[in-house]
Image (spheres, rainbow, N blue to C red):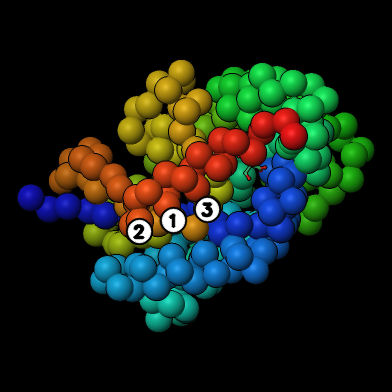
Amino acid sequence: MAVTKLVLVRHGESEWNNENRFTGWYDAELSEKGRGEAKAAGELLKKEGYTFDFAYTSVLKRAIHTLWNILDQVDRPWLPVEKSWRLNERHYGALQGLNKSETAAKYGEDQVKQWRRGFEVTPPALDRDDPRFPGHDPRYANLTAEQLPTTESLALTIKRVVPYWEETILPRLKKGEKVIIAAHGNSLRALVKHIDGISDDDIIGLNIPTGAPLVYEFDENFKPVKHYYLGNAEEIAARAAAVANQGKGK
Ligand SMILES: O=C(O)[C@@H](CO)OP(=O)(O)O
């Protein structure tokens, strides 16, 4: 049976992950620890014999620089890369920049959990004249007014991630190319929800750790047959739990 493998990786820890701030479309750089995680992910992929023909990432540097570190490690810095806003983190609206624990202390942990993980819950929206509104950023100059978010739920994130998967990434896998996607906690949650058919309720409990390669295997009909993280399972579970706990009050 022909098996197609796809590698997904969330960027390494960013400076705003480290400061525990809602990040969304803010263009935070990788922290030193995050660069180490990205390098380690690349070393692991190399050790396990993974090679790639094509890479996808977002237009945010924490994901782009994670991909660069990985491609360096697997000795494929020349690989073609397509960057798309559709793989960006979900937009966190007016929460962007706020500390998650302080926000939980102010509004309650339940409210923060709803904002972070409620499937259709949108955080408070930005005003379009807010400097954080992506319409002011030249990298989004080609987006239509409807595509420019002032806030996004996971449900809205799925609406821009899944067409990109269906129209761009999946056809490349079907051609037999080996693909890696470096993206973000919630754009990857959107993608795996779609691939695995995870329910709106069950997706709430899924947290993706930084810098851990997640391998999806598909059969010849491109049905997902299994998925697994590369690396130490206990450490990865602890890192996923730490992501869930970022929304606890101090
Ligand atoms: O702040 C964010 O943009 C995301 C990812 O870091 O956070 P959360 O896990 O709270 O959705």
Asked if residue 199 is positioned above or below residue 168 in the image, the reply reads above
Left or right, 227 with respect to 135, comes to left
Amino acid type for the residue under numbered disc 2: Gly
Which marked residue is nearer to the observer: mark 3 or mark 2?
A: 2
The quadrant of the picture occupied by the C terminus is: top right
Residue at screen point 46% across, 33% down: 206
Labels 1 & 3 near each other (Cβ < 8 A)? yes
Dot 3 corresponds to which residue?
A: 210
Q: Position of residue 209 (x, y in %)?
A: 50, 48
Ligand 1 placement by image quarter: top right
Residue pushed farthest right? 129
Find residue 212 and name its label.
Answer: 1
Element carrying mark 1: loop
Q: Position of residue 6 (x, y in %)?
A: 32, 54
Left or right, 13 with respect to 39, comes to right
Question: How far apart are labels 3 and 2 at the CA level?
Answer: 12 Å
Left or right, 68 with respect to 226, comes to right
